[in-house]
Amino acid sequence: MLAVLPALAGLAVTAPTSSRGVAHRVLLRCARDGAFADRALSSAIEGAGGLSGGDRALATELVYGVLRHTRSLDHSLAQLATLNRTALPTAVALRIGAYELLHLSTPDHAAVDEAVSLIGAKAQRRFVNGVLRNLARGRGRLVSPDADPRLGARAALAVRTSTPEWLLDDVARALRGGEAAALEEEGGEAAAAEAEVVAWAEA
């Protein structure tokens, strides 16, 4: 995961007047202040004013998508740059851009340019531009968590599914108590992740 620093002087956070600006502001609040995403998102959308339905939908997708995939996004980004002193606004912009490149159908140039626009300082804008352009060109060569020699099976599963390891432990304990059926009744992406947890916990 990215090790991030608080916002530094010269790293202006873009006022939330666009879908990505709203998402950036909300994700900053979640990471920095522990804000609840739903409340922060509702407040930011209302404060932005004038957002179209499509922009509201994109802001919502970016917030919840980045939160859902933070660990896997950070694992991908860390393969492209030394990120252990990345300021928080820059880290959030990178995650938004990476999410668009890896999980949405946003054109590469638009995903990169929009992420860069979220940062004020020129040096940080160049950094974000370089990292995301490298990601766009080299995403097919990324090492998956399962193939990462630094990660054991449990850690790889935690990164790949962006699931806290304590939750994996809780699921494993639940499975040992015969509670697997409830997990298998869920739908969508959560069910796929939970199925992998089941396989890991029963191995």
Image: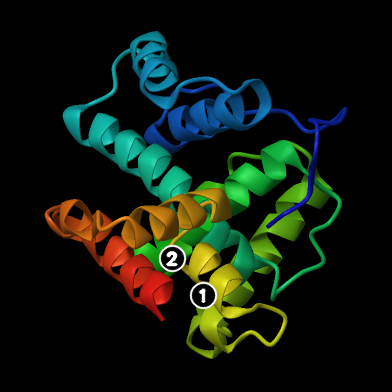
Q: Quadrant of the C terminus?
A: bottom left
User: Counting residues from the N terminus, which is met first, the one under dot 1 or under dot 2?
Assistant: 2
Q: Which mark is residue 104?
A: none
73 on left or right of 47: right
Residue 107 at x, y = what percent?
36, 65
Residue 159 position (above or below residue 151): above
Residue 138 visible: yes
Q: Where, by quadrant of the figure, is residue 51 drawn?
A: top left
Residue 158 at x, y = what percent?
52, 63
Q: Quadrant of the N terminus?
A: bottom right
Q: Where, by quadrant of the figure, is residue 129 drawn?
A: bottom right
Q: Are marks 1 and 2 in contact (CB under 8 Å)?
A: yes
54 on left or right of 118: left
Neighbourhood count class around disc 2 (C-alpha, 10 Å): few under 14, some 14–19, many 20 upward = many
Residue 116 visible: no
Secondary structure under badge 1? helix
Residue 76 at x, y = what percent?
59, 70
72 on left or right of 58: right
Residue that carries the numbered disc 1 in the rendered image: 136
At 79% from the left and 59% from the top, the residue drawn is 83
Residue 77 position (above or below residue 96): below
The three-letter amino acid code for the residue at tag 2 is: Leu
At 34% from the left and 76% from the top, the residue drawn is 199
**Exactly how many numbered labels are in the figure?**
2
The three-letter amino acid code for the residue at tag 1 is: Ala
Q: Where, by quadrant of the figure, is residue 138 drawn?
A: bottom right
Neighbourhood count class around disc 1 (C-alpha, 10 Å): few under 14, some 14–19, many 20 upward = some
Using the image as rendered, state which of residue 183 and residue 119 is in the foreground: 183
Using the image as rendered, state which of residue 164 and residue 96 is in the foreground: 164
Residue that carries the numbered disc 2 in the rendered image: 101
Residue 43 position (above or below residue 188): above
At 34% from the left and 16% from the top, the residue drawn is 42
